[in-house]
Image: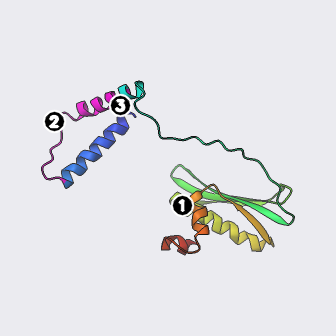
Amino acid sequence: MGQWATSCHFLWRWRNMKIHNEGFTRPYCLWHDILTAVSQYIQLKRNRLVQSSMVQVQAMISWEFLSKRWILLSSDASRGDAQVGCGSLFWDEHGTWLCGFSQCLGHFNAYVVELWGVYQSLKIVPDRGYLRVELNLDSKIIVDTLRSEGVGNVYDWRLI
């Protein structure tokens, strides 16, 4: 935990306390309280009293052949320099690249961009005459949305 993150946390916390708690007064020496908190955290971490909650999962990824006359559609979204985009690749049952696309979308959140990529990809399917499609996504929330059969956020279903 760095000084910058700790400073932001404390300043935000003190601001909210000032707004929502009439009797609250900010500490006189802000930087001293922040540095003390950082020092205490570092000491606790050295003594192994602070544990990370991050869990690392290792998964083997490989190409699996599809049934005949199926295509694989891999859709993804990305962000860079405050711009977002989406794209997809289409593969046949032998792993041969068939087509693909990419599109810059401007400024949206990752959820909208992922959904838009799936939408644009699935529009290509009938235009190319593909009949059977396996859709691969790396976003669990998009998969859950597509499997939810209309249950959930109305915003999601306007996009779909």
Mark 1 lies on a secondary structure that is helix
Q: Are marks 1 and 2 in contact (CB under 8 Å)?
A: no
Q: CA distance from mark 3 to mark 2?
A: 21 Å
Q: Is residue 78 left or right of residue 35?
A: right
User: What residue would you read off at disc 3?
Assistant: 41
User: What residue would you read off at disc 1?
Assistant: 111
Asked whether 104 or 36 is in front, the reply is: 36
The three-letter code of the residue at mark 1 reads Tyr
The three-letter code of the residue at mark 3 reads Tyr
Q: Residue at x 56, y 60 (%)?
A: 141
Q: Is residue 7 left or right of residue 113?
A: left
Q: Is residue 53 left or right of residue 26?
A: right
The three-letter code of the residue at mark 2 reads Tyr
Tell me where residue 55 sits by quadrant. top right
As displayed, is residue 6 above or below residue 23?
Answer: above
- Residue 43 in the image, given as x and y percentages of width and height: 36, 25
Q: CA distance from mark 1 to mark 3?
A: 34 Å
Q: Which mark is residue 28?
A: 2
Q: Are marks 1 and 3 in contact (CB under 8 Å)?
A: no
